[in-house]
Each structure stands twice: as C-alpha cells, then as structure tokens.
Image (tube, rainbow, N blue to C red):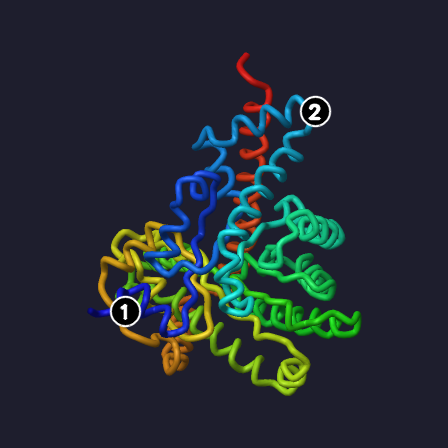
Amino acid sequence: MSPTPSAQISEIGVSIWLDDLSKDRLTTGSLQSLMDQHHVVGVTSNPTIFAGAVAGSNAYAEDLATMAKAGASPEEAVFEVMIGDIQGACDLMRPVFDATSGQDGRVSLEVSPLLAHDTAGTIAQAIELWGRVDRANLMIKIPATKAGIPAITEVIGQGISVNVTLIFSLERYADVIDAYFAGIEKALAEGHDVSSIRSVASFFVSRVDSAIDARLDALGSEEASAVRSQAAIANARLAYELFQARHASDRSRELVNQGMHHQRPLWASTGVKDPALPPAYYVTELAVSSVVNTMPEKTLLALESEGVPGGDRVSGHFDAARETLRVLKDLGISMEAVTDELEADGVEKFVQSWRELLDTVHQAMSGPE
C-alpha cells in the first residue's frame, strides 16, 4: 500500500502542524483524528483563529459567564479561554513531544498584537504566558517586527521556546536568525539548559504572491504573466538557503556543540488565495527536510487528495529562485516595498482580529440585553 501524501511529505522531513485550534477541536476528537490519520504533529494559533473560534461556537459561553460573574475584563477572559485551549492541545500533543525529543508536539500561543511595536511589553507578556500555560511543549509567538527582534533574543535568553511569526523578507529573516543565536548565547550565560529550547521562524508565503501577482496583473505584459505565482515560492526557497548557510556558520556550530538546536523554518500562510492554483501548492512546492508547514485543515485534506508530492522541491532550486526575483526587479517590482507593506498589514490584521475578539467576548460576558 502506497504511503499517503501526508505520510510521504513527513518522510521528506516536513513536520505538519495544524494552523487552527478551538475548544471544539479538543472536545470532539477532531484534533486527535488529524494526528492519527494525517500526521499532524503540532498546532499553531493566532488572534484571527481565536476570534473565529469564540465567535463561531457556544463552547465558551459557560466559561465566559463564570468569568463575567467574577468581574474579569474581556482581555482577562480572552487570555483565560486561550490558555485553556492551549493547555488542552499541549496535553494532547505531549506524546508526540516526548517521542520526538521536543522537536514536534508543539503548540503556539501569540502575545497580544497590540504589543507588536513594544519590546518591553512583549518580553513581559511572553514570560507571563509561559508561566501561566506551564507546559514544556508550548511555544510563545512573537512577531518579527523591529521591536520584536530584541524581544526574541531576551525571551529565548530566559529559556523560553519561541515561534517567530510574520516574517516576509529575507533581510528580516536574517535578523531573526541572529536574534535566535544571540538568545541562545544569553541563555547559556544565564545557565539555562539550551537543549530544552526550541524555535521556529514562520516565513509567510501566500500573502507574498497575492501582493505581487496584483502588481504583475496591473503590468499586463507577457513577461509579467510568466512569473505569476512564483514570487512567494522563490522567496521561501531563498529563505531555506539562508537557513542552511547561517546554521553552517562557525557561530552556529559552536552553539550546537553546547546543545543548541537549529531554528527550523516554518512555512506559514500556506492556504492558496488564488483559486487557479492547486490547493496544496504551497505545501508540495516547499517540501524539503528540516522544516515545518503549518496549514489549515482544508489545505491538509487537499494535499491528501491531490496525490503523492514530488519529493524535495527546494534544494537545487536556488538559482532559479534568484532569477525569478531578478525578473521582478527588472519589471519594477520591489520585494522590499512589498514585504514592508505585508508586515505592516499583517500586524494590523491581527490587531483588528484581536479587537473583534475582545468585542465578541465583551458581548458574551454582558449577556442578553
């Protein structure tokens, strides 16, 4: 019997993490089923996911009513329900965590997006959430904004595992890797066992194509059409090349000798936005060892139905990726401008989702008029 596509892509070295979490996923056995049948070995969450979970289910009503009676604020209640879901997912994933020596079985919880430009606030909340969740397989998500970079170093230096999110550009990704190394160096200096620290760098994919394809369509030329839906894959492949190069450095080797694990790239935003693309396009085209691909259930099931992926699609494609970016530059499309815009937009979307979540919780706690 041939292995399923999810099994084969796992064998290539891709860890499949589900980009979704809710109380319903835990109580109905949905998450366990995806683990058992589709090789899901981790979970990521974000403000948009939790906003949808709370708005779309009655599962939180009783907890929110109890917290309202206790006088909790909407923000306090939001963190309470999020922490509860995260703890449940961590407990469910614990056998995977143990079986993989901490590499997988991870669950990610994000700091408030209102802190995206507040270094000190991010550090304080990351430490607080790590203590409140109190699970070894937790990862705290910190955005790779300019204010987030020093926070990443400090939080890792405290012995906390970090999922760095909202990375769009190669330049910012290089900063993230340096921040990770600096964090491990700080952790060593503080006497932490760095072998217990794990980190992933969430490099966003489909949003890059959405932004660039709109510019290519506006140009309307044959040359522009020829590179449509290729920018995101090229950008991610070059990120993997950067991952390999930085982790082969003398600095990295010295830290590995002291117990550091490599900070794996994580392909995020892997659900296609363009209906003309194969639904699992950003999974099969970025299959390579030592990465995570976090995907919505729809994308995961599309992978299973599309057939067996074609092996490693990243190694050996670096020159072609550079050529794609060269063509874009010649067409007058600035990757730097696009990725700067995407970072700002990404933060704003999470802020909007956070405010919608607070509003939804506030209404639920207020009860019927």
Frontmost residue, 341 versus 333? 341
Residue 80 position by quadrant:
top right
* Horizontal side of residue 191 vs 25, given as left or right: right
Q: Residue at x 58, y 41 (%)?
A: 84
Residue 107 coordinates in the image, percent (x, y): 53, 55
Which residue position is annotated with label 2? 71
Q: Position of residue 128 (x, y in %)?
A: 72, 49
In this picture, is 128 found above or below 94?
Answer: above
Q: Amino acid at mark 1?
A: Pro
Which mark, by number, is residue 309?
1
Q: Is residue 92 left or right of residue 282?
A: right
The kind of secondary structure element at disc 1 is loop
Q: CA distance from mark 1 to mark 2?
A: 52 Å
Give the residue furthest to the left. 1
First in sequence, mark 1 or 2: give its number.
Answer: 2
Figure check: 177 above or below 21: below
Residue closest to the far bottom: 250
Number of residues whose C-alpha sits closer than 10 Å to that of mark 1, classed few (under 14), some (14–19) or many (20 or more): many
Foreground residue, 162 or 176? Answer: 162
Q: Could you tell me residue 314's position as x and y percent?
A: 38, 76
> Tag 2, which secondary structure?
loop
Kindly identify the amino acid type of the residue bearing the numbered disc 2. Gly
Circles 1 and 2: CB distance less than 8 Å?
no
Residue 330 in view: no
Res 176 seen here:
yes
